[in-house]
Image (cartoon, grey):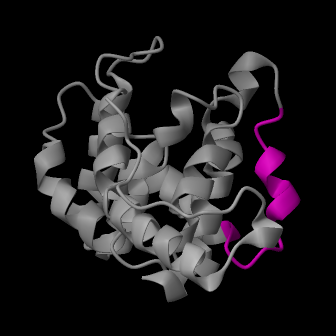
Amino acid sequence: MSNKPTETANFTTMTDATAEDYAVISDNFREFSNGLPDRVLSHLRLLDGDFGGFPIDRLQHSLQSATRAHRDGRDEEYVVMALLHDIGDTLGTYNHADIAATIMQPFLSDENHWITKNHGIFQGYYFFHHIGLDRNLRDQFKDHPFFNACAEFCEKYDQNAFDPDYEAEPLSFFEPMVRRIMAHPKTTIYKAAE
């Protein structure tokens, strides 16, 4: 089965492309980008059953993080950020926060993007000392304007979201939020292509 669209551009090098070629590409881009929430949610489901030694699997951790943020009255963007903060675990074993931050950057405020990108170092405050690392590694950012926001995210919604007895909302509860947040990029050159 081919995913080739019925209409394609006609160039072999970008230097030969025309406005008409890019009209075709833009139409395909819009259609493909509409499926982004589905692809992200499918990837999030890969965390189901992936315990990594933790008391609950990574999907449940994500659901607990988002549920805690939602029940605490955080706005929808923050809740989605909490849900997807560890989505990079499957492909970014050594840099999961960077992967999640890159996926979410077009849809997040600068503050929520910074939290996503740096939560791994901030989360280390709770366990780095147990594995021979400096738990205060986050202090390198102590003068950053989003330091306290990231520390708060880890304290309230990340480090405590490993409770097998916590009643988290199901993924279906958050799916409409993901779709709304990912419907309109905030910070990308492709915003104009919507």
Q: Quadrant of residue 176?
A: bottom left
Which image quarter is the C terminus in? bottom left
Which is nearer the eye, 73 or 95? 95
Q: In which quarter of the image is residue 156?
A: bottom left
Residue 97 visible to an observer of this rendering: yes
Which image quarter is the N terminus in? top left
From the viewer's perspective, is 192 left or right of 127? left
Relative vertical location of residue 169 with respect to residue 19 in this rendering, above or below: above
Was residue 144 drawn as part of the magenta stretch in this picture?
A: yes
Relative vertical location of residue 170 with respect to residue 94 in this rendering, above or below: below
From the viewer's perspective, is 19 left or right of 74? right
Give the residue displayed 12% in from the left and 54% down from the top: 173
Which is nearer the eye, 35 or 47? 35
Counting every numbered tag in the picture gives 0
Magenta span: 134-147
From the viewer's perspective, is 65 left or right of 151? left
Which is nearer the eye, 55 or 190? 190
Was residue 8 drawn as part of the magenta stretch in this picture?
A: no
Give the residue displayed 77% in from the left and 51% down from the top: 138
Give the residue displayed 62% in from the left and 84% down from the top: 19
Give the residue displayed 63% in from the left and 32% down from the top: 92
Residue farthest to the right, as pictured: 140
